[in-house]
Amino acid sequence: MSFLSKTLDRVKPSPTIAVSNLAMELKAQGRDIISLGAGEPDFDTPAHISAAGIRAIEAGKTRYTAVDGIAELKQAICAKFKRDNGLDYAPNQVSVGTGGKQVLYNALMATLNPGDEVVIPAPYWVSYPDMVLLAGGTPVFIEATLDNAFKITPEQLEAAISPATKWFLFNSPSNPTGAGYGWDELKALTDVLMRHPHVWVLTDDMYEHLAYDDFAFCTPAQVEPALYDRTLTVNGVSKAYAMTGWRIGYAAGPKPLIDAMRKVQSQSTSNPCTISQWAAVEALNGTHDFIAPNNAMFARRRDLVVKALNAIEGVTCPVPEGAFYVYPSIAGLIGKRTPAGTVIADDETFARALLEDTGVAVVFGAAFGLSPNFRISYATSDAALAEACARIQRFCAALV
Ligand SMILES: Cc1ncc(COP(=O)(O)O)c(C=O)c1O
């Protein structure tokens, strides 16, 4: 009999690890590796936010707090939802956790029973299906295809909902595609949800502030206020504020759900890091002046990468609305061979051969549930991106 939990049998190890292990091995051998795998900004936390963390330490704010967040942070979160999304929440409808990841996990742990289904558009953030499985539920996927710019249609959503559906897990702008749903596109989806009152909405708005050109972010409870009583809106400070290591995420929703999530957290990690909570108060209440210049930089990098990828025969890359990822299709390269004779049978072989031959590390599409594609994170310097794109172009041109 195995000592390990049977639940773990349902969960696969992160498929991205193989590629990143190989990248690390090659780097250790002295190879020149450009990693385009990281899901985090390449700049430091803004100084005024870090200073708030330092002040918290100096003021002795280093003890346990209330399980799901200090009152000051909950107030700042309520103000943020009002300011950015037009949503009214009271502090007792807010939960703060150790990253958006823990908040999502708490929500699933607090609600799923065996047999419960969670509808997830694919490609998806790698953690969604496995978190659902760990919580005892069943993920049900909807394919968001390249033809529809990686967005699902209302018809697909309608077809995926069953009497067992508990949640619709929504993420816009998306990791890994960067696709963002505009107001009308989202309204068409919320109209479907209005016909299925047993389905709740778990919306992951982590990339809200990373939106480019004239894309206007919107969130389900804002687009369809009648969904307010069955929506959990998740967000966090990791991405837009370059605070990935501080580990603060949050959510707002119906009080009974927030209470249940607190119960899960109280018996696992207790409160998120006290110092980080004070830094997050400053992040949400302080100046947002740095966001526009950062976004201008990200949009420029996105354009650089999309242009370089679309110049490659066999590669197609739509222009995403937000986040800092692109998700090109390599359908036109499948079946070709590298000069050394490796057949590009799928996107995993592509990513591995690209890394071995050129030193460019990307994440293959199968990890995100839609193939044949790969994900590039363009949250890295212009110079590194230009060099990586040139290497990808040479690698693809050499395929026969
Ligand atoms: C779509 C999405 N949601 C949630 C998270 C989790 O963010 P964190 O736990 O750092 O707040 C990430 C991080 O990569 C993400 O890409």
Image (spheres, rainbow, N blue to C red):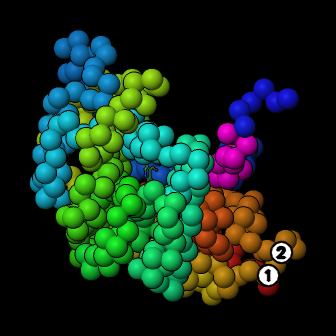
262 sits to left or right of 25: left
Label 1 beta carbon within 8 A of ligand 1: no
Q: Which kind of residue does numbered mark 1 sit on?
A: Gly
The yes-or-no answer for disc 2 within 8 Å of ligand 1 is no
Location of residue 156 in the rendering, given as x and y in whole percent from the top left corner: 49, 79
Give the camera-side residue of 372 and 380. Answer: 372
Q: Quadrant of the N terminus?
A: top right
- Viewer-proximal residue among 58 and 223: 223
Rendered view: 273 above or below 302: above
Provide the residue designation for mark 2: 343
Q: CA distance from mark 1 to mark 2?
A: 6 Å
Q: Count residues near mark 1 (Cα–Cα under 10 Å), then give few for <14, some for 14-19, many for 20+.
A: few
- N-term-proximal mark, 1 vs 2: 1
Image: magenta residue range: 7-18
Q: Is residue 338 visible?
A: no
| Marks 1 and 2 close (CB-CB < 8 Å) | yes
Q: Position of residue 49 (x, y in %)?
A: 23, 36
- In the rendered view of the protein, which quadrant contains the C terminus? bottom right
Residue under the point 58% across and 53% down: 115
> Left or right: 259 with respect to 319?
left
| Amino acid residing under circle 2 | Val
Instruction: Determine whether, in the image, residue 113 is placed left or right of residue 299.
Output: right
Residue 182 magenta: no
In the image, residue 76 above or below residue 66:
below
Mark 1 lies on residue: 335
Q: Which element carries disc 1, helix, strand or loop? A: loop
- Of residue 369 and residue 290, the one placed in the foreground of this image is 369
Residue 307 image position (x, y, % from top left): 46, 80
- In the rendered image, which quarter is residue 296 located in? bottom left
Image location (x, y in percent) of residue 135: 55, 43
